[in-house]
Amino acid sequence: MKGHREASMMWGYLAVMTAAACWGTSGIFIQLIMTQIDIPAAALAFWRDTAAFLAFSCISGMFRRREELRIQKSDRIWLILMGFSLGLFHVSWNLGIFLNGPAITTVQQAAMPVIVILVARIVWQEAFTVRKIAAVTLIATGTILVSGLISSVRNEVTTAGIAAGFSVPATYAAWSIFGKQLSGRYAPEVVLTYAFGIAALVLLPFQFFVASPLPVPPQTWLCFAGLIGLSTVAGFFAFAFGLKHLPAGVATVLVMSEILFVSVYAYSLWGEMMTPIESFGALLVICGVVALLQRRKYRPTED
């Protein structure tokens, strides 16, 4: 029994690490696409959300019964808000990748728990414990360092880059919070089908005011296919499989390895490296997230 449990957890570890490796390719594919063709961030976000909607629609249609595709009326507002914020997140994410690079933007995204904690405190009056305060301090400080606000080394730091960097965790937190209202009641792929569809509809009006990226060269289509198939669909299913074999807290800490994967990808392809200050900031962010999710394994007992 113990051996079976250990084997199950090992599969969970491998699945979550695979998800992190898949998600880490998102910024790489986006940067490749935006350097190969002249496409605005909003246009790329729209086509990504549209393609992901079609992919998850096919998956939900094949593996879910019709009654499992229905969303209760009371939950539809959360689904709409989730899709709306998901569309904005992808625009912010694309801008962050273009202005700051994949490695830095991935670390900035990891600051999302700070916003979730603050919202939980304001909306649900959740306790602001010492552990949470310490985690928020570490994550906020690390994000500031990574964003280049006090850096004298990088000359390319811009106001737009800083704004995009801080909008990434804000919009990421928004769609995560709204998505939490639906978790456990519906199949994840069903929720994502509707969320990506709504995100595409939100971004559709903006497509009339941006230049068309067509024609698209074959290598760009390959990058886009990787963005949808590997970064989005494969990453989601690997993480969903991992959650079946690991506690959610452990999986969330493990998925922080995405920062390491992105750093390796970016350095291998473009020689992109963080400065020492930015690397220290990334370490603070990781420590803050781990501290936030840490739970006591043992409680002291009286002899």
Image: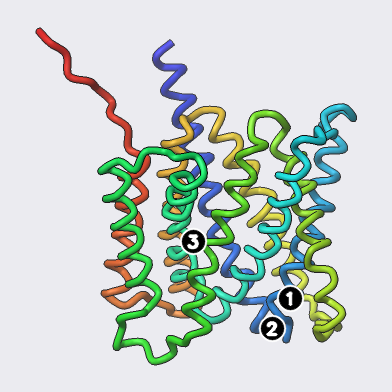
- Residue at the extreme left of the image, as rendered: 303
Asked if the residue at tag 2 contacts the one at tag 3, i.e. Cβ–Cβ closer than 8 Å, the answer is no
Asked if the residue at tag 1 contacts the one at tag 2, i.e. Cβ–Cβ closer than 8 Å, the answer is yes
Task: Name the residue that disc number 1 marks.
Answer: 219
Which comes before the other along the chain, label 3 or label 2? 2
Which residue is nearer to you in this view: 141 or 280? 141
Tell whether 200 sits left or right of 259.
right
Crowd class of label 1 (few under 14; some 14 to 19; many from 20; radius 10 Å)? few
Q: Secondary structure at mark 3?
A: helix
Tell whether 165 sits left or right of 296.
right
Task: Name the residue that disc number 3 marks.
Answer: 109
Residue sitting at 71 percent across and 44 percent down? Answer: 78
Which comes before the other along the chain, label 2 or label 1? 2
CA gap, disc 3 and disc 2: 25 Å
Which residue is nearer to you in this view: 68 or 220? 68
Quarter of the image for residue 184 reads top right
User: Residue 197 at what x, y percent from top left?
Assistant: 81, 54
Q: Secondary structure at mark 2?
A: helix
User: Residue 69 at what x, y percent from top left?
Assistant: 84, 34
Give above or below for 5 relative to 257: above
Q: Quadrant of the C terminus?
A: top left
Crowd class of label 2 (few under 14; some 14 to 19; many from 20; radius 10 Å)? some
Task: Name the residue that disc number 2 marks.
Answer: 36
Crowd class of label 3 (few under 14; some 14 to 19; many from 20; radius 10 Å)? many
Q: Amino acid at mark 1?
A: Gln
